[in-house]
Image (cartoon, rainbow, N blue to C red):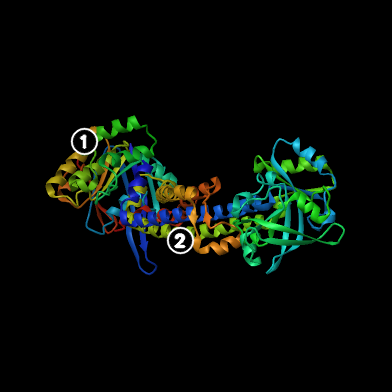
Amino acid sequence: MTLIKTENLTKIYSDGKVQVEALKSVNLEIEAGEFVVVAGPSGSGKTTLLNLIGGLDKPTDGKVYLEGVDISLLKRDEMADFRLRKIGFIFQAYNLIPVLTAFENVELPLILLGISESERRKRVMEVLNLLEIGELADKKPNEMSGGQQQRVAVARAIVTNPSIVLADEPTAHLDSKTGAMLIDLMQEMNRKRGITFVICSHDPQVIQKAGRLIKLRDGTIEDDKKFW
Amino acid sequence: MIFKLAWRNIWRNKRRTLIVVVSIVVSVSVLLLIDTLSMGMMKQMLDNQINLHIAHIQIHKRGFNDDKTLKNYIPDSEKIEEVLRQIDEIKFYSRRVISYGLINSAFNSSGVIIVGVEPEREKNITIISRSIVEGKYIGEDRGIILGKKLAQKLNVEIGDKVVLMVSDLNGNVSSDVFRVIGLYESPSSEFDKVYVYIPIESAQQLLGLGDKVIEFALILKDQNFINSVKDKIARAIGNSYEVLSYDDISPLIRIGIEMYKELIWIYYLIFGIAVGFGVVNIMLMSVFERVREFGVLKAIGMKNKKIFALILLESFMIGVVGTIIGLVIGLVLYLPLSKTGVDLGIFAESLAWFGSGRIIYPVLTEFTLSLLIFTMPFISLIGAIYPAIKSIKFEPVEALKHI
């Protein structure tokens, strides 16, 4: 089943004088359950592609379909709701809410979904334990290491059982060992839970774990290989 | 969770939040004291006017209020007394004879208002009997009591003789000698210079009124009954009489109180503007420090209206915390002062001129309390609207790039 489809996806950044074409008519289809790594040098358009797929940004031209829905037609609040239900995000800088504990950070999307407290507690602890950070539940981000924070970010991204998790350079701030562990963990989530992952990275150890590798250069797809 | 998030957010920068909280605390406690003191002063002025002479209700022959001459006497006071005795809401009443006249001592003279009273009944109507500072209150003898200020002007003491000179009912000059038996000192120095008291029989004799009286002064069981009792009396005694409340007799007091009520809004406005700017300032700083976080919240699916509500809630909480502490401090200061009063001795002369005592007892009304409870949280909410609008203007992708 096609989960994501882009049609002539184009993004042009303009500051009034200079125009930069970050993505040039990108056509792409991603199936449910894939473990996709989008690689490419800086400025190739990886993050732009991820932002457009995740509905964080609007394309200059072209369309993005997520589960058949043209997300460029969604209004602001509809898009927020769509992101809440369908998409999980993992950021390079973890981006946990500093005043909330690990448990509360993971719980936040479930609260926004209106899930009951007992159900939230069950699901949050299940995900934290799955990621082996159950003991960090009461810790705040500044009491955790980078690797631990990124695990909490992964937990927050998958706790709502989204259709897809979008990760932007998730290992960039981690040492190689922690980075490798994190990518193994994401792969495990992909295999065990069937969650589709789209990861932007130029980290070789992430690239070598890709189920499908899409190489971007100057805003166009240079290469697209499927390994498993 | 939104409450928890808002509460923790406001304490991220403790010093900044505390500065605004302290400004609210100071504003609330100062406003509480200013408002209750002013209200106390107004209430005292009103009570003094009522208790000094006016009473709750006065009854005269129609036309007396515009033409205070003896010809406007009450011809059949027994009929009125009969009506008054049947109205339960009336606590006390007293008959009076009132006339303008001249008082002479061996040294000086002065224009006065002569009040002939029923000494025992009048004790329940006014505070004059309790304001005697030298000598005694009038009884059945031919004594006169004067304000201490007037006695000083006339250079008389207890036991000295004074002569009252009036124009009687027939327009003839009439005079009589009275012995000063008591000096009083009321909260109003201007009153003390003018009003002198003699027994009603002496006044009737001096003025040639026979057994006629000029006015009835009434004290009710509850001030709230005034309008209904006034109507009841007016219906019963007919059109030949005027039944007036203290408000009709001395509208300046009501105007003063109305003016004060308008004025107190200015205090609230000044403090509100000061606090409002503080709130806008810290909330804007707080929003700009958290741009990236708003991007994250939007990315995980938080809608703009929730983010907007979060900012308003944070500001509202600051307003509530400041108000609670301010009210506690204000009440801790207010409660003992409401019993002991505040001695404004340095303003004693002007306060006496206004008819208020030098000791002011602050009065906290339900209206003031509600105003204090709601003003600062409301202003905090208003002050957070602009920062909250800013917080939802950021596009998620731009916000996430923010450092």
The location of residue B282, given as percent across then percent down, is 38, 58
Q: Residue at x 72, y 57 (%)?
A: B178
- Element assignment for label 2: helix
- Is residue A222 in sight in this rendering? yes
Disc number for residue B314: none
Name the amino acid type tagged 2.
Answer: Ala
| Quadrant (top left/top right/bottom left/bottom right) for the N terminus of chain B | top left
Front one among A9 and B29: B29
Considering the image in quadrants, where does the C terminus of chain B appear? bottom left
Q: Is residue A125 left or right of residue B78?
A: left
What subunit carries mark 1?
A
Q: Amino acid at mark 1?
A: Gly
Q: Residue at x 22, y 54 (%)?
A: A40
**Mark 2, other Cα within 10 Å: few <14 / some 14–19 / many ≥20:** some
Residue extending furthest right?
A: B170
Residue B286 horizontal/vertical position (percent): 35, 56
The residue drawn where x is 66% and y is 66% is: B154
Residue A194 appears left or right of B163: left
Residue A73 seen in the figure = no
Q: Mark 1 near mark 2, Cβ–Cβ under 8 Å?
A: no
Residue at (65% x, 46% y) in the render = B123
Give the residue number, with chain letter if any, for mark 1: A134
Q: Are marks 1 and 2 on the same chain?
A: no
Q: Residue furthest left?
A: A177
In the image, A194 versus A105, the foreground residue is A105
Q: Examine the rendered structure and indicate whether residue B103 appears above or below residue B138.
A: below
Q: Give the CA separation, mark 1 to mark 2.
A: 48 Å
Dot 1: what SS? helix
Q: Residue B36: image x %, image y %?
A: 52, 52
Left or right of B16: which side holds B319? Answer: right
Which of the labelled discs sits on residue B274, or is there none? 2
